[in-house]
Amino acid sequence: KHCRDFSKILSNDFEKIQSVYLSLNEKEEYLNLAIEKIDEFKNKLEDIKQMQDLYEILQPLRTQFELNLA
């Protein structure tokens, strides 16, 4: 009887550990996906910033060009 009870307790604990492990694996995929999306968003923001910097650099040239046309 004690062996059966002990075996049942171990089996239940093992199932709980398996469940937690599987749950963590599933969440890891979601976390990796979230990290990937955050990186993509960060890269888009960096691209926008670089375009803004380029616009600021070229603005005086554009203004001079417009003045020359006038």
Image: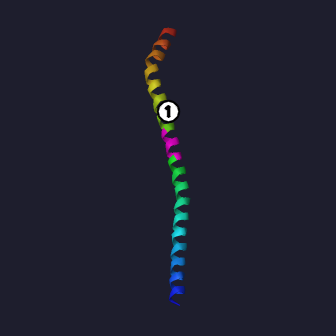
Q: Which SS class for mark 1?
A: helix
Looking at the magenta stretch, what is its main secondary structure? helix
Q: Is residue 38 above or below residue 26?
A: above
| Range of residues picked out in magenta | 36-42
What coloring was used for the rendering? rainbow
- Residue 39 among those drawn in magenta: yes
Kind of residue at disc 1: Asp
At 44% from the left and 27% from the top, the residue drawn is 53
Residue 20 position in % (x across, y down):
51, 67
Q: Nearer the viewer, residue 32 or 65?
A: 32
Residue 34 position in % (x across, y down):
52, 50
Taking the image as shown, residue 12 lies to the left or right of residue 59, namely: right
Where does label 1 land, which residue? 47
- Residue 12 among those drawn in magenta: no
Q: Nearer the viewer, residue 68 or 5?
A: 5
Q: Residues within 10 Å of mark 1 (few under 14, many from 20)?
A: few
Which residue is outermost to the bottom? 1
At 50% from the left and 88% from the top, the residue drawn is 2
Q: Is residue 11 above or below residue 36?
A: below
Q: Nearer the viewer, residue 40 or 65?
A: 40
At 52% from the left and 86% from the top, the residue drawn is 3
- Tally the marks: 1
Q: Is residue 41 above or below residue 65?
A: below
Q: Nearer the viewer, residue 35 or 18?
A: 18
At 48% from the left and 40% from the top, the residue drawn is 42
Which residue is outermost to the front? 3
